[in-house]
Amino acid sequence: MKVNRFFIGSRFVIASLFCLLAVGTFADDEKDKEKERTEIRQMAQQTLARLYKAQPSAQAAVQKGYGYAVFSNTGIKILFGGSGHGEGVAVNNQTKAETFMKMFEIQAGLGMGVKKFKVIFIFANQKAFDGFVNSGWELGGQTSAAAKTSPEKGGAMQGAASVSDGIWMYQMTDKGLALEITAKGTKYSKDGDLNKS
């Protein structure tokens, strides 16, 4: 009888330890995710500040848009191929809701090196924003678009390129605002790990 009680007690202690370990692991995982979300928010704010300094009219465009998104991208190219990856956040200006996202690109053509840049999207309407955030979005192949002033916006989108219906894009490099935006088959989608359910 004492032996049975010992085994039952041991099993209870072991089960309790496993539960505590699982809770501790979950808590650590949540801390890591929150730290990453905070870093993405900081990157987005710093990128917007740089954009507003380089192109002051962009601030009104971001604030008046239905929503916006900011991404940080690092691309690596070795000889005939390369890839890039990054992360960012899309913000609905109407509700202030955040959607954390990731990006991936495939690069073709000859080259070598590492390239870092930031991308800012402005969405003119709900359809454009919801399509980008909820359905995933892909930006063309090896195409480029010149950053220009939008006549219908009265110059508010100066320095941005129209990349899709209702979607404008700025690209920032270490040197400042890019005058030509190159699309490299970039795919944008929700980050399943960072978004709270």
Image: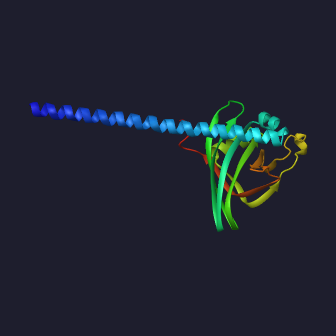
- Relative horizontal placement of residue 27, taking residue 76 as reference (left or right): left
135 w.r.t. 49: above or below: below
Q: Residue at x 64, y 35 (%)?
A: 98
17 w.r.t. 176: above or below: above
Q: Is residue 66 visible?
A: yes
- Relative horizontal placement of residue 21, taking residue 183 as reference (left or right): left
The colour style of the image is rainbow
Q: Residue at x 11, y 34 (%)?
A: 3
Furthest residue to the front? 175
Q: Is residue 195 visible?
A: no
Locate residue 34, reporting x and y percent. Answer: 55, 36
Locate residue 196, reporting x and y percent. Answer: 54, 36
2 w.r.t. 135: above or below: above
Quarter of the image with the N terminus is top left
Locate residue 71, reporting x and y percent. Answer: 68, 46
- Relative horizontal placement of residue 67, taking residue 135 as reference (left or right): right
Furthest residue to the left? 1
190 or 11: nearer the eye?
11
Locate residue 130, reporting x and y percent. Answer: 68, 41
Q: Residue at x 77, y 47 (%)?
A: 169
15 or 55: nearer the eye?
55
